Image (cartoon, helix red, strand yellow):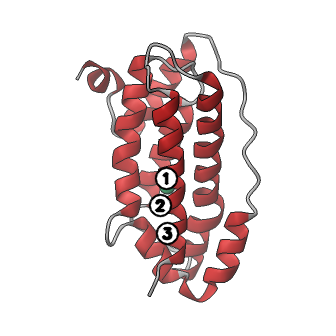
Amino acid sequence: MENVIKNFFVADHERIDALLDVATADAENIDMDLYHQFRVGILTHIKMEEKILFPAAQYANGGVPLPLAAELRLEHGAITSLMVPPPTPDLIKVLKYVLHLHDDKEERRGGMYDKCAELTESETESLLRQLQQTTPVPVHPHNLQDYALDVAKRALTRAGYDYDAIAAQ
Ligand SMILES: [Fe+2]
Ligand SMILES: [Fe+2]
């Protein structure tokens, strides 16, 4: 059977990735209008997962969080914190590294999207409607203080990633 929910999220990953790729095609000269659209896209995507999809799957799972949920939530926190400081070539490198691994945990066969879609099979239509009606997350201007990057680095550490090591690769 066609996996409507998974297809919806995979298509959104592709749309958001494309925005990021075009915005950062020249890492030294980031297109800030497109990068803003990317930030709205990724934060709204995370909102759809955290506020609609994962809770619906947890409810259908008898209230028990899915095994991957905690790990993905930490990564959402790390990705969100990377949206706060202004983008640099290092930040973009780390962001793409984490996003690639994160999206794979959700998209791969038997991954989070397959599990969520399976558990919520009886409510696909209403879930899809809720997802399509999600309002875009309001995005704040970048925080130019140095501590914003430190906060992001600590959020990455909590999610199991070493910002400086990835940037130095
Ligand atoms: Fe996610
Ligand atoms: Fe996702």
Q: Which residue, given by chain and number where applicable, does mark 2 sit on?
A: 10
Q: Is residue 129 left or right of residue 150?
A: right
Evaluate if marks 1 and 2 touch, with contact meaning CB atoms under 8 Å apart: yes
Q: Quadrant of residue 43?
A: top right
Mark 1 residue CB less than 8 A from any atom of ligand 2: yes
As drawn, 18 above or below 154? below
Residue 127's x, y, as percent? 66, 75
Residue 54's x, y, as percent? 55, 66
Asked whether 70 or 164 is in front, the reply is 164
Q: Which residue, given by chain and number where applicable, does mark 3 sit on?
A: 7
The amino acid marked with disc number 3 is Asn
Mark 2 residue CB less than 8 A from any atom of ligand 2: no
Q: Is residue 22 left or right of residue 109?
A: right
Q: CA distance from mark 1 to mark 2?
A: 5 Å
> Dot 2, crowdedness within 10 Å: few (<14), some or many (≥20)?
some
Q: Which residue, given by chain and number where applicable, does mark 1 sit on?
A: 13
> Dot 1, crowdedness within 10 Å: few (<14), some or many (≥20)?
some
The amino acid marked with disc number 1 is His
Instruction: Identify the residue at horizontal 72%, vertical 69% (top origin).
Output: 130
* Secondary structure of the residue carrying numbered label 3: helix
As drawn, 101 above or below 128? above
Q: If the image is split into quadrants, where does the N terminus sit?
A: bottom left
